[in-house]
Amino acid sequence: MTKPIDEGLGHHGDAEVAPGLIDLAVNVRREPMPAWLADPITASLSTLAAYPDATAATAAVAARHRRDPAEVLLTAGAAEAFVLLAQAFRAARRPVVVHPQFTEPEAALRNAGHTVERVLLREQDGFRLDPALVPPEADLVFVGNPTNPTSVLHPAATLAALTRPGRTVVVDEAFSDTTHNPQTYDREPQSLAQRRDLAGLVVLRSLTKTWGLAGLRIGYALAAPAVIERLRQHQPLWAVSTPALAAAAACASERAVAAERAIAAELAGRRRHLTDGLAGVPGVTVAGDPASAFVAVRLAGADKVRLELRERGYAVRRGDTFPGLGADWLRIAVRDTATSDAFLATLSDVLKERL
Ligand SMILES: Cc1ncc(COP(=O)(O)O)c(C=O)c1O
């Protein structure tokens, strides 16, 4: 029997945005599209009479991650992959979702009839994962890295320690391309995308965030060929459109990956600027050690503060719909430093007036 899902699990940052508001709620980068990405998408429009053929884009994505094309399934965003996994692994006996995290994996599991067990990470632990928290019998585990909304980046070794024969571990790397370490500038510091040695590992990737393609819908799953084949059997025919395939191929190029690394490095500076600013606002605590395009903050009465920020022109993401957070939490997107400064001034004003 299908279980009805919690109202809150279906809430996403886009619902917070309205005309006239400065959007700090949605974690999609909004910059002009580079020509190397816009041109192939535009060119693909002249071929729309033909059904999509994913062969070339699949090969390009496989090459990017040094994998075989049989280990790649292109999807209509990472969101489609959650649904495919929930359906393909219907026989899972003990599915576990590590929270707080993006709510769609749990929603997809519940919609497919699974009874979901939650592992809740705690603020006092910096929302870091201890693999021992996951029950040994869990045979399907979902974890985000870096995690939305906490922005915490788990070490690759911690996630690798979750894998074992008989268990499928799904690591949602939708935001891995936003992570940066100056010592390993050229690669995402904790990504498992290239790891073929870990039993049952499924890595999900999204191209909608950094490349501002949320409306195009493009992402992919990386896993052993047998798992990819199982997911494919549940995917509707032609699920990924020709323009989305053109984007996938373009974003897999060396040029795109180099651009991603540069964007992640710039983002790290902007994030530091925001977190330094937040540290100076009395009553505000930044969660963990943020590593992505957003930060989670705790402040008393955040649910009311969010409404006051809206009155003053800022949309931020409510935290109460994330399992493991609550009414005292907000998620704030990292933007350019001028936008962050203006937001910080407004937040300080709102909080002063509440004293
Ligand atoms: C952590 C996380 N994973 C996956 C997704 C879904 O991304 P996509 O647009 O690729 O479906 C989102 C979207 O917000 C997300 O925050």
Image (cartoon, grey):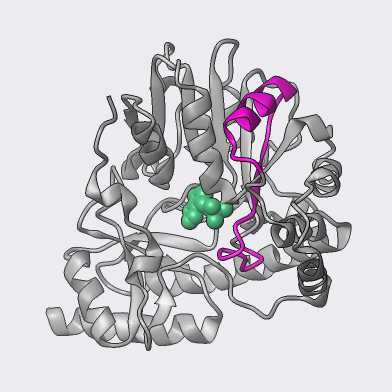
Point 57% across, 31% down: residue: 234
Q: Quadrant of the C terminus?
A: bottom left
**Where 164 sits versus 189, above or below?**
above
Considering every residue shown, the one lying at the far front of the view is 49
**Where 341 sits versus 138, above or below?**
below
Evaluate whether residue 145 shows in this view. no
Residue 293: quarter of image: bottom right
Point 63% across, 58% down: residue: 178
Depth order, front residue of 338/91: 91
Point 76% across, 69% down: residue: 45
Evaluate whether residue 202 shows in this view. yes
**Where 23 sits versus 98, above or below?**
below
Point 61% across, 30% down: residue: 231
Q: In which quarter of the image is the N terminus?
A: top left
Residue 301: quarter of image: bottom left
Depth order, front residue of 94/354: 94
Q: In the rendering, at what x and y percent does residue 161 appear? A: 58, 22
Q: In the rendering, at what x and y percent does residue 39 appear? A: 82, 74
Is residue 167 shown in magenta? no
Depth order, front residue of 230/156: 230
Residue 70: quarter of image: top right
**Taking 37 as reference, is 320 left or right?**
left
**Where 98 sits versus 46, above or below?**
above
Considering every residue shown, the one lying at the far left of the view is 355
**Taking 150 as reference, is 308 left or right?**
left
Q: In the rendering, at what x and y percent does residue 80 appear? A: 54, 44
The stretch in magenta equals 210-237
